[in-house]
Image (spheres, rainbow, N blue to C red):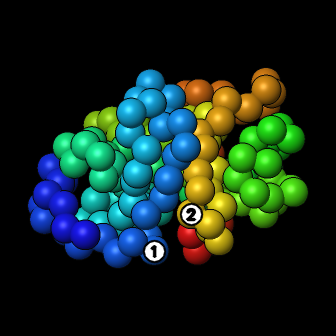
Amino acid sequence: MKIETKIFGEIEISEDKIVTFQDGIIGFPEMKRFALLHDEERGAGAGIRFLQSLDEPGFAMPVMDPLVVKPDYAPVLSQEELEELGVERSEDLCFYALCVARNPVAGSTVNLRCPVAINDRTRQAVQVILDTEEYQMHHLLSEFSRKKGEEQVC
């Protein structure tokens, strides 16, 4: 499938790369189909990807593997969320945290409270709000050490 995007121009997305959110994402319930895109020119060093909407080509959100900044990141989903994604354990999912890029970069934030969880096998996804005080919606990137974790393969 070909789509015209604001950030990447015209791109080809294969059907097996489409990630589906049954109920859309928080604040945008009508957007259900997305692709995770990686662009060397836009944040490759920080592991930044873009969750590109296929329903609204002008909409893309920067996301990152939270393990890059917090290697012990271990969100726990509810039983209902796990069932929706077709897994038994949170560890069976890939997680991405939404980012807000600012200039200077030290002012950029990452949302560890509301990650996107993806079942890489089925390509089903959900954005969740974690019921914990451990993770916040606005962690400054400057809070985290410069250690790099391994990126996920999703």
Estimate the x, y position of residue 61 in percent, counting from the top left.
37, 44
Estimate the x, y position of residue 17 in percent, counting from the top left.
43, 70
- Give above or below for 21 relative to 27: below
- Give above or below for 121 relative to 46: below
Quadrant that contains the N terminus: bottom left
Q: Quadrant of residue 111?
A: top right
**Label 2 crowding class (10 Å Cα cut-off): few <14, some 14-19, many 20+?**
some
Q: Quadrant of residue 86?
A: bottom right
**Label 1 crowding class (10 Å Cα cut-off): few <14, some 14-19, many 20+?**
few
Distance in Å between CA atoms under marks 2 and 1: 8 Å
Q: Residue 142: in sight, yes or no?
A: no
Q: Nearer the viewer, residue 58 or 124?
A: 124
Residues marked 2 and 1 touching at CB (< 8 Å):
yes
Instruction: Identify which residue is drawn at 43% across, 63% down.
Output: 18
Q: Nearer the viewer, residue 37 or 30?
A: 30
Answer left or right for 90 relative to 61.
Answer: right
- Inspect the image, locate mark 1, and give the three-letter code of the amino acid beneath it: Asp
Q: Nearer the viewer, residue 73 or 76?
A: 76
Disc 2 target residue: 123
Instruction: Identify which residue is drawn at 73% across, 32% down.
Output: 130
Secondary structure beneath disc 1?
helix
Which numbered disc, 2 or 1, marks the residue that appears first in the sequence? 1
Answer left or right for 54 relative to 27.
Answer: left
Answer left or right for 92 relative to 34.
Answer: right
Estimate the x, y position of residue 68 in percent, counting from the top left.
60, 59
- Inspect the image, locate mark 2, and give the three-letter code of the amino acid beneath it: Arg
Secondary structure beneath disc 2?
loop
Disc 1 target residue: 16
Quadrant that contains the C terminus: bottom right
Q: Residue 18: in sight, yes or no?
A: yes
Instruction: Identify which residue is drawn at 80% across, 38% down.
Output: 80
Estimate the x, y position of residue 125 in percent, counting from the top left.
58, 51
